[in-house]
């Protein structure tokens, strides 16, 4: 598990380093096609990150012989041996995916709202409602993760 943590940290730090490198104008002048380089870099990053996440999830699943216990004493030992890591992953995914969805929704609603406000300033209240509804999705994800933490 430690190796997996180190590899995922390496992916994150590599992404940050590539962002810093590609934000330099001198470096971007020497790149023939920045769009292709960016797409390729993002693709490799996402594939490696999802691969590591899949491996982490599979490594947290308890052994099959532990789950095959049939007696009541064995069932209580199973309940004591189950790793709460899957609950933590579920809580993180619920918050993270809800926040990403809310960010997309706020971006779309905010851009449309600014366009509408520039033409008709009296529509400010209505556009703020739409942006607030999109932000509510992130709050729902946070509530779900708090409920998951309460069970773990």
Image (spheres, rainbow, N blue to C red):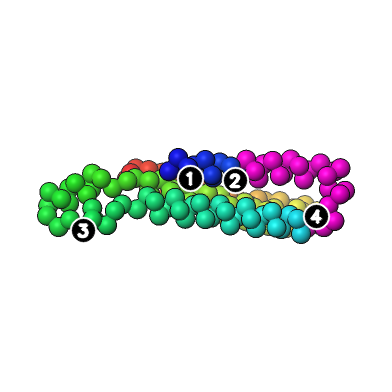
Q: Name the residue under label 1.
A: 4
Q: For the magenta stretch, what is the residue range?
A: 13-35
SS category of the residue bearing label 3: loop
Q: Distance between the residues labelled 1 and 4?
A: 31 Å
Q: Name the residue under label 4.
A: 34
Mark 2: few, some, or many residues within 10 Å (few <14, many ≥20)?
some
Q: How far apart are marks 4 and 2 (CA)?
A: 21 Å
Mark with earlier residue (3, 1):
1
Marks 3 & 2, CB-CB < 8 Å contact: no
Q: Name the residue under label 2.
A: 11
Q: Distance between the residues labelled 3 and 4?
A: 54 Å
**Nearer the observer, 65 or 23:** 65
Q: Nearer the viewer, mark 3 or mark 1?
A: 1
Mark 3: few, some, or many residues within 10 Å (few <14, many ≥20)?
few
SS category of the residue bearing label 2: helix
Q: Distance between the residues labelled 3 and 2?
A: 37 Å
Residue 144 image position (x, y, % from top left): 42, 49
What secondary structure prevails in the magenta region? helix
Q: Nearer the viewer, mark 1 or mark 4?
A: 1
Q: Distance between the residues labelled 2 and 1?
A: 11 Å
Residue 17 lies in the magenta-colored region: yes
Instruction: Specify the label residue 68 is tagged with.
Output: 3
Mark with earlier residue (3, 2):
2
Residue 79 image position (x, y, % from top left): 23, 48
Left or right: residue 73 versus residue 114 is left
In the displayed structure, 44 sits above or below 22; it is below
Mark with earlier residue (2, 1):
1
SS category of the residue bearing label 1: helix
**Residue at image location 34% in from the left, 45% down from the top:** 84
**Nearer the observer, 89 or 10:** 10
């Amino acid at each position: 598990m430690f190796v997996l943590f180190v590899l995922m940290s390496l992916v994150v730090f590599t992404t940050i380093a590539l962002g810093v490198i590609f934000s330099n104008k001198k470096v971007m002048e020497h790149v023939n096609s920045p769009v292709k380089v960016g797409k390729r870099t993002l693709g490799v990053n996402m594939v490696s990150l999802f691969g590591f996440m899949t491996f982490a999830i599979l490594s947290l699943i308890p052994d099959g012989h532990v789950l095959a216990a049939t007696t009541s004493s064995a069932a209580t030992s199973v309940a004591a041996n189950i790793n709460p890591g899957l609950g933590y992953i579920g809580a993180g995914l619920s918050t993270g995916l809800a926040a990403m969805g809310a960010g997309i929704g706020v971006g779309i609603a905010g851009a449309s709202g600014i366009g509408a406000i520039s033409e008709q300033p009296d529509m400010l209240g209505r556009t703020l409602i739409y942006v607030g509804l999109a932000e509510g999705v992130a709050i729902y994800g946070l509530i779900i993760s708090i409920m998951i933490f309460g069970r773990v």
